[in-house]
Amino acid sequence: MAAPATSATAAAGALSAFLKGVERRALVVAGLQGGDEDAAGWTVAAAMRAFAGPAAGMPMADWPIRFWSLLCGSPSLRAPSTGGGWPPPLAHLQGLAPAERLALLLRIGAGLDEDAASAVLGLAPEDYRRALTGACPLDAQGYPDAVAWRGLAEQVQAQVRDLPPARLQQLEHLRQPMAADATPVSRPAAAAPPRAGAGDRAARPSRRAGSRWTWRTWLLLCLPLLLLAAVAFWWWREHGLALPGTAAPAAEGTVSDNGPVQIEALPDSDLPAAPPADGSRAAADAAMLADPELALAEDADFYAWHAAGGPVPVDESQAQPSRAEPVGTALETVDAED
């Protein structure tokens, strides 16, 4: 029961905020379009009443174009002004045609871009640009005057900003009842399905219970397989797999190599060596034996050592004394024996 009231309050608040943000500009645009502030107040009030009714049933993004279309569709804004007055800084607006003046005010007063303004006026973008060009002030040479354009925009914005307090209070009194009367378009709530009794729940198992039972069934089926895989992995880590052609696992504390071992049968050592092929080594041996420098080649290592300056080796063919003679012992000579 609280949801419709909350929705209505939110719609009324959104509508009030939109009208509060657009009412100043609408009042200035309507007043400068016809040159009559009193008539502009009635025109804005009529547009706000026409907008507030169906606004709650349309997207908020469509609100600006809808409101300005209602305001600009008023006959008082499209008809030529008679007896209107404009302040001196905005005297340029008085000499414009109604369509050109409204195109200019939607741009510098309402702040709409070209696409939105053309949609509000029901014109093609090219036609709106043409009307905007006709409303642009010109300099002495007949070219668009950017300085005058900026001056017009600043004067219009000043009027929007400096509305008299009496006009603001009038707009507030006009806005509040319209926001309160806004009612959102509510959709009929879908009827709640009838609640099943105890007998129906017992006779018809729930879908969630069925899916939960299926999950438990799969878990019970997969649990033994997981336990078997864990035991097999532990046995392989502890004892290894005795495959054919592989060595037994090494004892604890020894170094072993678990790499792959290739086994290849060696030839029997008892078999006699195959005789050399005829003529394979005989010719080479005969050439070596017939070489006259064969003896010199056999002692080549000795000659190389001698040429390098190596000392003459000690002759160890005679028996050597077992202990050294005292230093003071006199050398015996042949004369001493005599």
Image (spheres, rainbow, N blue to C red):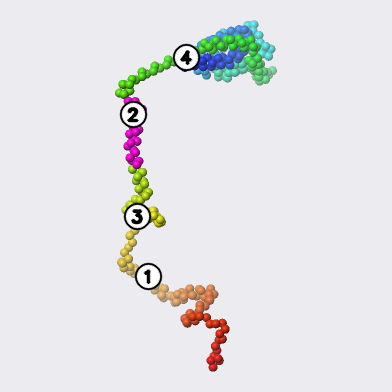
Mark 2 residue crowding within 10 angstroms, few (<14) / some (14–19) / many (20+): few
Measured Cα–Cα span from mark 3 to mark 1: 48 Å
Measured Cα–Cα span from mark 3 to mark 2: 53 Å
Q: Find residue 337 and report its horizontal and vertical position in percent.
A: 53, 91
Badge 1 element: loop
Q: Say which amino acid is labelled 2.
A: Gly
Q: Is residue 329 left or right of residue 256?
A: right
What quarter of the picture does the C terminus occupy?
bottom right
Measured Cα–Cα span from mark 2 to mark 4: 42 Å
Q: Earlier in the sequence, mark 3 or mark 2?
A: 2
Q: Earlier in the sequence, mark 1 or mark 4?
A: 4
Q: Earlier in the sequence, mark 2 or mark 4?
A: 4
Q: Find residue 79 and report its horizontal and vertical position in percent.
A: 59, 8
Badge 4 element: loop
Q: Which numbered mark, 3 or 4, is in the foreground of this view?
A: 3
Point 46% across, 74% down: residue: 297
Mark 1 residue crowding within 10 angstroms, few (<14) / some (14–19) / many (20+): few
**Which mark, residue 185?**
4
State the residue position of label 3.
248
- Is there CB contact under 8 Å for labels 2 and 1? no
Q: Say which amino acid is labelled 1.
A: Arg
Nearer the observer, 8 or 18: 8
- Is there CB contact under 8 Å for labels 3 and 4? no
State the residue position of label 2.
210
Quadrant of the rendered structure where residue 118 is? top right
Q: Say which amino acid is labelled 4.
A: Val
Q: Which numbered mark, 2 or 1, is in the foreground of this view?
A: 2
What quarter of the picture does the N terminus occupy?
top left
State the residue position of label 1.
281
Q: Which residues are magenta?
A: 204-227
Q: Say which amino acid is labelled 3.
A: Ala
Measured Cα–Cα span from mark 3 to mark 4: 86 Å
